[in-house]
Image (cartoon, grey):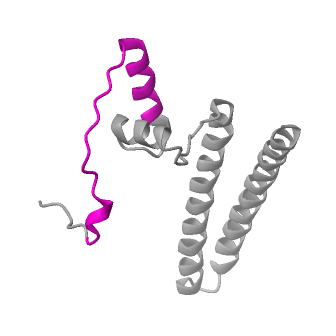
C-alpha cells in the first residue's frame, strides 16, 4: 500500500539530523513512546525538540478491580434483559393458566436487576470518593 500524498510540500520533513543515545536513554524514550500519542521515537524526540505538545497516558492500576466489576455488572444486566425478553415472549404465547408463572419469573429477574443496580451504585460511590480525594 502506498503512502498518502502530501498536498503541501512545505510540510514534508526534508532535513535529517542524527542523534545518538546511550542504552538507558534509548530505553527510556522507547517506554515513553508506549505511554504517549507519539508513534515512534523519532516523532517523540521531534516533538520534544520543537516544544510541540504531546500527551502522556497514565493508567491507574488501583481502578482495575472496580472496572472489572463494572464490566461484569454490564454483562449481567444484558443477560437479565435477554432473559426478560424471552420470558415476555413465553408469557404472550402461553395459555392463561401459565401466565402467572411467567409473570413471577419476570418479577424475579427485575429483583435481580435491583441487586445489580445496588452494587453498581456502591461501586460508583466508591470511585467518586476516590477521585474526589485527589
Name the side, left or right, on which 3 lies relative to 46: left
Is residue 10 shown above or below 23? below
Percent x, y for residue 104? 72, 69
Residue numbers of the magenta segment = 7-33
Closer-to-camera residue (132/34): 34
All told, the count of numbered labels is 0
Please indicate whether residue 130 sits to the left or right of residue 20 in the image: right
Residue 66 image point, x, y percent: 68, 40
Left or right of 58 on screen, residue 23: left
Please state if 104 lies on the left or on the right of 76 as rendered: right
- Establish if 14 lies above or below 66: below
Identify the image quadrant of residue 41.
Answer: top left
Residue at (34% x, 37% y) in the render: 42
Any magenta on residue 29?
Answer: yes
Q: Quadrant of residue 25?
A: top left
The structure residue drawn at horizontal position 59% and vertical position 78%, both measured from the top left corner, is 88
Question: Would you place residue 127 above or below residue 106 in this image?
Answer: above
Q: Nearer the viewer, residue 72 or 109?
A: 72
| Residue 32, magenta (yes or no) | yes
Near-viewer residue (57 or 38): 38
Residue 109, picture quadrant: bottom right
User: Which residue is at a point 60% across and 67% down the rendered structure image?
Assistant: 81
Image point 43% across, 27% down: which residue?
Answer: 29
Question: Which quadrant: the C terminus?
Answer: top right
x, y percent for residue 1: 11, 60
Amino acid at each position: 500500500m502506498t503512502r498518502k500524498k502530501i498536498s503541501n510540500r512545505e510540510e514534508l520533513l526534508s532535513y535529517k539530523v542524527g542523534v545518538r543515545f546511550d542504552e538507558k536513554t534509548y530505553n527510556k524514550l522507547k517506554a515513553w513512546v508506549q505511554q504517549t500519542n507519539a508513534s515512534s521515537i523519532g516523532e517523540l524526540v521531534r516533538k520534544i525538540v520543537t516544544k510541540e505538545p504531546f500527551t502522556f497516558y497514565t493508567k491507574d492500576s488501583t481502578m482495575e478491580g472496580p472496572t472489572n466489576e463494572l464490566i461484569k455488572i454490564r454483562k449481567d444486566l444484558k443477560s437479565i434483559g435477554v432473559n426478560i425478553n424471552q420470558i415476555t415472549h413465553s408469557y404472550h404465547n402461553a395459555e392463561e393458566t401459565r401466565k402467572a408463572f411467567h409473570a413471577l419469573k419476570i418479577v424475579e429477574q427485575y429483583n435481580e436487576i435491583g441487586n445489580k443496580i445496588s452494587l453498581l451504585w456502591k461501586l460508583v460511590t466508591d470511585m467518586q470518593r476516590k477521585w474526589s480525594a485527589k
